Image: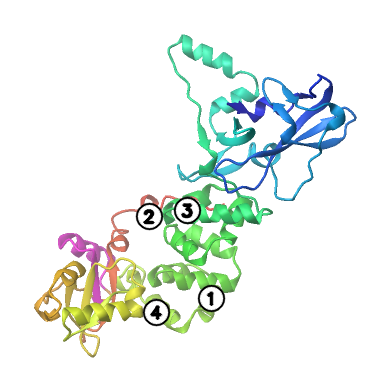
């Protein structure tokens, strides 16, 4: 393997041993291949002129940089505008390791000769990369060997690397696709560790749904910082994508004027749900409940219930569907059935014969501590919130929101900052 630290700064010779100049950088092109090809060397020639030599004329890069043609036959490379300069744009910069789901600093870049061309195979993010650049790698490895220690290189394969550059829309688009496939909590951690410019660049190009999921895994401080860097229209769109309870919590921590402005931009149905949640104290069931839950009207067969859920827009908004609630014409809670029991039952069976009628429920002003206690006591994944006196179902409190009482947010959402 060859490293860019062993190439940049070295003299370049032609096929006859005449000096061409000194290598200043290595250029790679845009490619769908996992390991992009080197397309040119940036050389400062003997007359102090910057030239780009086509990579096809490279005979070797190490131990000496030798071209395959005489100085008089150099084929100068013409830039296409989408090349990546490894020293200028990658070395000592932040990149995202999508396999390790972390932000790392590039200490060196690995090259290899494959199928008659040089390609970039990985980035070195370990201490050996730094030692190599100052010429101490071999010495340190010998000393370590004397003491029976084995030092390993920390190289990340290039196809696991996400490079972020605001002025490079093609690569940024590919980077966004890779990062968007990660779990929301990992995306939040990555954005937290990126510098301000890189984080903003990625966020600007991320889908609203992905960004909304990421914000739900972030502490309130992070949420506020993210929204403050977005225009009002996009901020409202992202709030619409969030769970109503999460959106309400976020709006409650914003200045009143900002919250009102965003609520006016949100679709009326979603805004109404959020306003309802904002009316309850934050440490009560009403303050932590979500209005998104799966329900069916009473009097259906199993087959009818399944068809009802498939066509229900409300059910489609529910991410974690464990329980199906049965409501009457006034939306009063009559019972609950496990989704598994509904799927496994015979199609002609009546839902009333399968549902649990003596279920545990709470009122909007039930304290958050009592909600957590009840869910732990009865081993519930969610608990229905009903209106006192009418039994009209208002929403549900999910387990993750309930355990905020006993599990501090610092442990549940461990993100100290965004930028």
Q: Judge the density around disc 1: few (<14), some (14-19), many (≥20) Cα neighbours within 10 Å.
A: some
Task: Tell me which label, 1 or 3, sits earlier in the chain.
Answer: 3
Q: Name the residue under label 2.
A: 409
Quarter of image, res 37: top right
Circles 3 and 4: CB atoms closer than 8 Å: no
Q: How far apart are marks 2 and 1 (CA)?
A: 25 Å
Q: How far apart are marks 3 and 2 (CA)?
A: 18 Å
Q: How far apart are marks 4 and 2 (CA)?
A: 24 Å
Q: How far apart are marks 1 and 3 (CA)?
A: 25 Å
Q: Is mark 1 on a helix, strand or loop?
A: helix
Based on the picture, tell me whether residue 407 belongs to the magenta stretch: no
Q: How far apart are marks 3 and 4 (CA)?
A: 27 Å
Give the vertical position of 14 relative to 411 (above or below): above
Q: Mark 4 points at which residue?
A: 273
Q: On residue 187, which mark appears? A: 3
Q: Mark 1 points at which residue?
A: 262
Residue 284 in sight here: yes
Based on the picture, tell me whether residue 371 belongs to the magenta stretch: yes
Q: On residue 154, which mark appears? A: none
């Amino acid at each position: 393997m060859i490293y860019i630290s062993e190439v940049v700064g070295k003299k370049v010779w032609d096929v006859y041993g005449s000096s061409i100049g000194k290598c200043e950088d290595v250029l790679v092109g845009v490619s769908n291949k996992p390991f992009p090809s080197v397309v040119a060397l940036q050389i400062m020639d003997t007359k102090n002129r910057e030239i780009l030599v086509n990579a096809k004329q490279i005979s070797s890069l190490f131990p000496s940089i030798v071209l395959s043609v005489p100085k008089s036959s150099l084929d100068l490379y013409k830039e296409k505008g989408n090349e990546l300069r490894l020293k200028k744009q990658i070395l000592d910069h932040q990149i995202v390791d999508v396999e390790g789901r972390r932000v790392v600093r590039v200490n060196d870049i690995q090259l290899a000769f494959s199928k008659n061309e040089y390609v970039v195979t990985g980035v070195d993010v370990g201490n050996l990369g730094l030692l190599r650049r100052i010429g101490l790698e071999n010495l340190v490895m010998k000393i370590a060997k004397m003491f029976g220690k084995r030092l390993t290189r920390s190289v990340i394969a290039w196809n696991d690397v996400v490079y972020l550059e605001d002025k490079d829309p093609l690569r940024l688009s590919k980077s966004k696709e890779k990062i968007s496939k990660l779990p929301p909590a990992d995306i939040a951690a990555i954005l937290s560790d990126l510098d301000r410019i890189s984080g903003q660049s990625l966020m600007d190009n991320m889908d609203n749904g992905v960004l909304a999921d990421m914000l739900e895994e972030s502490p309130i401080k992070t949420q506020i910082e993210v929204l403050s860097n977005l225009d009002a229209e996009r901020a409202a769109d992202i709030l619409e994508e969030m769970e109503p309870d999460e959106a309400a919590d976020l709006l409650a921590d914003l200045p009143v004027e900002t919250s009102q402005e965003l609520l006016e931009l949100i679709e009326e149905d979603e805004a109404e749900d959020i306003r309802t949640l904002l009316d309850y104290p934050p440490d009560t069931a009403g303050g932590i409940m979500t209005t998104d839950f799966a329900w069916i009207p009473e009097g259906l067969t199993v087959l009818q219930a399944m068809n009802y859920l498939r066509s229900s827009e409300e059910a489609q908004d529910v991410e974690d569907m464990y329980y199906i609630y049965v409501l009457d014409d006034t939306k009063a809670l009559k019972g609950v059935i496990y989704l598994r029991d509904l799927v496994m039952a015979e199609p002609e069976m009546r839902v009333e014969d399968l549902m649990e009628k003596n279920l545990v429920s709470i009122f909007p002003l039930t304290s958050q501590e009592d909600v957590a206690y009840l869910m732990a006591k009865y081993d519930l994944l969610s608990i229905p919130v009903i209106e006192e006196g009418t039994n009209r179902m208002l929403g549900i409190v999910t387990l993750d929101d309930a355990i905020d009482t006993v599990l501090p947010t610092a442990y549940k959402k461990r993100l100290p900052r965004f930028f």
